[in-house]
Image (spheres, helix red, strand yellow):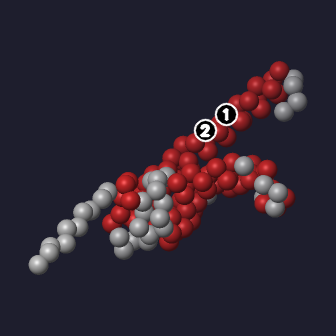
């Protein structure tokens, strides 16, 4: 009799079993990169304004986090522990973007506009 040996690899080596991603932050990174370039996309840029969308996200942070998590766990699934690890990585990345990076960008923008207004330069 031959005994079959199975080796388990970490999700970082094999990728997400649910969706095949090779990197922990691949989907959220791609989604947020698209968000920051949405004004330049031919079809989307005509209908969606990144500035207005950023303001909406800032006003509705919890709802935005809930929507991204529904999408995140919907893609990765919850049946496999490795998929959950990938989804939790996406959760961490989305939380950083929603609660830290976007508010910081808006703070810098308001500060720049105030500085230009005080100098007399057009905003």
Kindly state the secondary structure of the residue where label 1 is placed: helix
Q: Are marks 1 and 2 in contact (CB under 8 Å)?
A: yes
Q: For the view shown, which residue lies furthest in the bottom direction? A: 1
**In screen coordinates, is 26 left or right of 1?**
right
Q: How many marks?
A: 2
Q: Spatial distance from mark 1 to mark 2, Cα to Cα?
A: 6 Å
Residue sitting at x 82%, y 57%: 42
Q: For the view shown, which residue lies furthest in the top direction? A: 119
Q: Position of residue 92 (x, y in %)?
A: 45, 52
Q: For the view shown, which residue lies furthest in the left direction? A: 1
Q: Position of residue 94 (x, y in %)?
A: 52, 53
Camera-side residue of 59 and 48: 48
**Badge 1 density bin: few <14, some 14–19, many ≥20, Cα 10 Å:** few
Q: Quadrant of the C terminus?
A: top right
Label placed on residue 108: 1
Label placed on residue 104: 2
Residue 103's place in the image compared with 12, above or below, is above
Is residue 55 shown to the viewer in this render? Answer: no
Is residue 44 shown to the viewer in this render? Answer: yes
Residue sitting at x 61%, y 56%: 31
């Amino acid at each position: 009799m031959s005994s079959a040996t199975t080796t388990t690899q970490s999700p970082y080596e094999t990728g997400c079993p649910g969706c095949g991603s090779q990197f922990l932050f691949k989907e959220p990174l791609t989604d947020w990169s698209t968000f920051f370039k949405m004004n330049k996309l031919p079809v989307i840029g005509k209908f969606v304004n990144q500035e207005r969308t950023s303001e909406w996200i800032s006003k509705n942070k919890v709802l935005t986090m809930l929507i991204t998590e529904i999408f995140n766990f919907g893609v990765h699934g919850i049946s496999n522990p490795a998929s959950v690890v990938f989804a939790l990585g996406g959760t961490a990345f989305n939380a950083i973007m929603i609660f830290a990076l976007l508010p910081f960008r808006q703070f810098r923008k308001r500060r720049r506009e105030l500085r230009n207004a005080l100098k007399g330069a057009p905003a």
